[in-house]
Image (cartoon, rainbow, N blue to C red):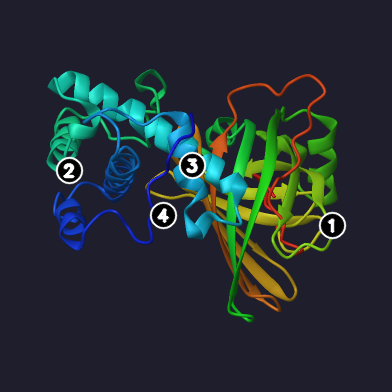
């Protein structure tokens, strides 16, 4: 039996009035963002399940069929897979809320989501990205930069949109990233500190990052893969700002020293200056298993990029490889992922 997909969705499923209602909650910006994601997912799931029994969540095949018909995703099968995962995760979150209210999940309305978000906020909880298990919610602030890097350790799938300002064109891409913690006493970090003329005694730790990526403008057979090592030397007592020493730069592949700083929302800011350009990156967690990354490079090549990175919780099959499935030009290197 084949699954009939509903017509492609050409615009946001949320009306202008509904978006205004979400903004009027006056929840913190990140919580409003998560609430919008959940509301968007609810409307999308309702559209997918239009021909199913009232209130029932659509199955995996129906969601996949719907995603494959979205014009904006026609050339991005990897992002289609991510979207399907997010919708299924949102469905589980909606099911949990619906059970609490004694309703069918797709019988929920925007007011139900808003009320739940406000109730959670009032009880000092937070609405998180769809699919984040309650037991895994990161409720405490991130103490310092080393803690942020430790939270980033693991395997990630990254979906990237790069905007080339000179060409006025956007380019999609994808990558698989692995981040492994390295102890402060590791010979690789000591060598990097000495290379930059810094005292190795100031190191608190670091990471090794490997990546396999592609971008939409790549030529046939062109691929992006590699490895980078970096170390942290705090310059304040709290460990929230200092030097980031790398064996490869973000905008150039030569060894480079940048600066890191944690902002008031526990986002990690990385700045690096080169002879002909400068880069600024910001990393933040939308949940334990979802990381957001923005970056800009100004100089000879002006680009702005946005990445959504999802933690891979399952180990790959024995002998399996993890090449980037998206077609992705030469891009700068980032310390927490290509």
Mark 4 or 2, closer to the camera: 4
Mark 3 or 2, closer to the camera: 3
Q: Are marks 3 and 2 in contact (CB under 8 Å)?
A: no
| Among the two numbered marks 3 and 4 on one chain, the one whose residue lies closer to the N terminus | 4
Which structural element holds mark 2? helix
**Residue at which label 4 appears:** 8
Q: Residues within 10 Å of mark 3 (few under 14, many from 20)?
A: some
- In the rendered image, is residue 287 in sight? no
| Among the two numbered marks 3 and 2 on one chain, the one whose residue lies closer to the N terminus | 3
Q: Going by the image, does 222 lie left or right of 100? A: right
Whole-number angstrom distance, CA of label 2 to CA of label 1:
46 Å
Q: Measuring 69% from the left and 61% from the top, which residue is drawn there?
A: 216
| Among the two numbered marks 1 and 4 on one chain, the one whose residue lies closer to the N terminus | 4
Q: Nearer the viewer, residue 271 or 66?
A: 66
Q: Which mark is residue 45?
A: none
Q: Nearer the viewer, residue 139 or 313?
A: 313
Image spot of residue 84 (x, y percent): 48, 38
121 versus 282 height, above or below? above
Mark 1 or 4, closer to the camera: 4
**Residue at which label 1 appears:** 222
Q: Which mark is residue 65?
A: 3
**Residue at which label 2 appears:** 110
- In the rendered image, is residue 18 in sight? yes
Whole-number angstrom distance, CA of label 3 to CA of label 4:
10 Å
Q: Are marks 2 and 1 in contact (CB under 8 Å)?
A: no
Image spot of residue 264 (x, y percent): 37, 48
Image spot of residue 27 (x, y percent): 20, 46
């Amino acid at each position: 039996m084949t699954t009939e997909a509903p017509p492609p969705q050409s615009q946001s499923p949320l009306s202008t009035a509904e978006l205004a209602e979400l903004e009027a909650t006056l929840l913190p910006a990140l919580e409003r963002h998560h609430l919008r994601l959940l509301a968007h997912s609810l409307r999308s799931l309702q559209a997918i399940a239009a021909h199913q029994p009232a209130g029932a969540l659509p199955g995996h095949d129906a969601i996949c069929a719907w995603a494959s018909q979205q014009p904006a995703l026609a050339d991005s099968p990897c992002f289609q897979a991510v979207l399907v995962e997010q919708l299924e995760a949102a469905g589980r979150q909606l099911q949990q809320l619906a059970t609490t209210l004694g309703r069918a999940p797709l019988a929920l309305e925007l007011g139900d989501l808003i009320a739940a978000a406000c109730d959670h906020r009032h009880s000092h909880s937070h609405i998180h990205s769809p699919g984040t298990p309650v037991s895994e919610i990161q409720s405490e602030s991130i103490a310092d930069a080393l803690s942020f890097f430790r939270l980033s350790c693991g395997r990630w799938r990254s979906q990237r949109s790069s905007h080339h300002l000179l060409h006025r064109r956007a380019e999609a891409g994808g990558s698989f990233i692995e981040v492994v913690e390295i102890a402060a006493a590791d010979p690789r970090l000591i060598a990097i500190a000495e290379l930059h003329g810094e005292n190795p005694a100031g190191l608190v730790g670091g990471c090794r990052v490997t990546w396999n990526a592609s971008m939409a403008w790549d030529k046939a057979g062109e691929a992006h893969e590699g490895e980078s090592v970096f170390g942290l030397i705090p310059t304040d007592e709290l460990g929230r700002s200092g030097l980031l020493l790398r064996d490869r730069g973000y905008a150039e592949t030569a060894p480079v020293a940048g600066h890191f700083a944690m902002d008031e929302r526990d986002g990690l800011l990385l700045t690096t200056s080169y002879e002909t350009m400068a880069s600024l990156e910001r990393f933040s967690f939308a949940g334990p298993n979802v990381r957001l990354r923005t970056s800009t490079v100004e100089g000879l090549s002006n680009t702005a990029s946005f990445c959504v990175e999802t933690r891979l919780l399952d180990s790959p099959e024995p002998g399996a490889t993890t090449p980037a499935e998206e077609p992705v030009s030469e891009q700068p290197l980032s310390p927490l992922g290509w």
